[in-house]
């Protein structure tokens, strides 16, 4: 897997907001010492036939971004970079409106119509407004991955801890954890999920979660091998492990599995219950979605980002937009 380059992200342990500095007196509890949420045996994720779709290139977003996850979709907006590699532009897919962002950041968390960045270029952009507003005073606090955004909150990862805070507030709540760098968290407010390495030496990477209103962090999925690339949307959670793509309902904890060779580069993209991912078959990389929408063909397709009928992918250095003629959010 090619790790993104977060030029300014450091693995320095700092206090966040008004929280007290963290100095663990005891080792972190193992996943084996805490109860995981109940989970039924996984069901097979049945993928329907591909719907009719069209495809067009997006040359305005051809420039490489410093954060390799971009360009990406923020609802009906494509967010991407100019020649400088910063997130300086957005285009509305229905109206064609183009917005040039003021004080563009290197990296950000996205939600529908919103962009949030920490660091020197911190702030919240609510499209189509090009100016960042409601900037939190949580600037550079040693983030080790890009933040996750879901109104009204933000989640961020730091060495030895996770943090959550309201977008318009400078006070963060933090808990000790062992989040890994490069893997952004997933946020289903008020619960944050992340890839945790506390048991990495014994049985691999795990997915942990923390609802700051309900108690301490808890293991979501622990198993031999590496669970990684976590994503969340509404009541759904997705991740990738050595077996393939997993999809879980937050509320019932029911799980579905699609066996595939995935997770070697980009993580899954989740729109409600619809997951999209990279899949390697016979040496070729394609993008597939659980509702049947896909991007296949000569060459490698990758870096999926999904919202509504739109699937944003990259083939080589050029982004393409795949649009389903009729797409509906469906349960697995």
Image (cartoon, helix red, strand yellow):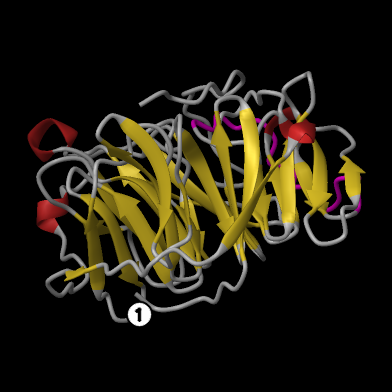
Residue 274 at what x, y percent from top left?
Answer: 45, 66
- The answer, for residue 205, to whether it is visible in the render is yes
Q: Nearer the viewer, residue 221 or 304?
A: 304
Residue at left offset 17%, top offset 48%: 243
Residue 128 or 305: which is nearer the viewer?
A: 305
Can you name the residue that lies furthest to the bottom here? 252
Q: Residue at x 43, y 68 (%)?
A: 291
Q: Does residue 108 show up? A: no
Give coordinates of residue 228: x percent, y percent: 31, 43
Q: Is residue 282 above or below residue 112?
A: above
Crowding at mark 1 (Cα within 10 Å: few <14, some 14-19, many 20+): few
- Whether residue 151 sits left or right of residue 95 in the image: it is left
- List the residue tagged with mark 1: 251
Q: Quadrant of the N terminus?
A: top left
Quadrant placement of the C terminus: bottom left
Q: Nearest the camera: 85 or 164? A: 85
Q: Which stretch did the figure color magenta? A: 129-144
Q: Secondary structure at mark 1?
A: loop
Q: Main secondary structure of the magenta part?
A: loop
């Amino acid at each position: 897997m090619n790790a993104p380059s977060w030029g300014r992200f450091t693995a320095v342990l700092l206090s966040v907001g008004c929280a007290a500095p963290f100095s663990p007196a005891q080792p972190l509890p193992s996943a084996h010492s805490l109860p995981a949420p109940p989970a039924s045996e996984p069901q097979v994720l049945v993928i329907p036939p591909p719907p009719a779709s069209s495809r067009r290139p997006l040359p305005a977003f051809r420039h490489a971004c410093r954060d390799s996850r971009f360009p990406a979709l923020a609802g009906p907006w494509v967010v991407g970079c100019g020649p400088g590699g910063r997130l300086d532009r957005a285009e509305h897919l229905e109206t064609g409106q183009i917005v040039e962002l003021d004080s563009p950041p290197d990296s950000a968390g996205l939600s529908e119509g919103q962009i949030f960045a920490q660091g020197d270029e911190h702030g919240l952009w609510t499209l189509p407004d090009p100016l960042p507003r409601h900037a939190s005073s949580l600037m550079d606090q040693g983030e080790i991955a890009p933040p996750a955004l879901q109104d009204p909150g933000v989640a961020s990862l730091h060495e030895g801890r996770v943090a959550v805070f309201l977008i318009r507030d400078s006070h963060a709540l933090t808990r000790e954890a062992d989040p890994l760098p490069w893997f952004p968290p997933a946020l289903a407010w008020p619960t944050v999920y992340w890839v945790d390495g506390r048991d990495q030496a014994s049985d691999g990477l795990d997915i942990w979660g923390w609802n700051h209103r309900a108690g301490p962090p808890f293991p979501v999925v622990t198993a031999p091998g590496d669970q990684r690339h976590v994503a969340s949307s509404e009541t759904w959670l997705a991740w990738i492990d050595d077996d393939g793509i997993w999809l879980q309902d937050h509320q019932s904890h029911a799980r579905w599995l699609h066996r595939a060779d995935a997770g070697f580069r980009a993580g899954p993209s989740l729109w409600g219950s619809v997951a999209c991912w990279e899949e390697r078959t016979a040496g070729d990389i394609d993008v597939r979605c659980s509702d049947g929408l896909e991007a296949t063909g000569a060459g490698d397709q990758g870096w999926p980002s999904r919202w509504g009928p739109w699937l944003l992918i990259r083939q080589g250095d050029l982004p393409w937009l795949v649009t389903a003629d009729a797409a509906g959010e469906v349960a697995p």
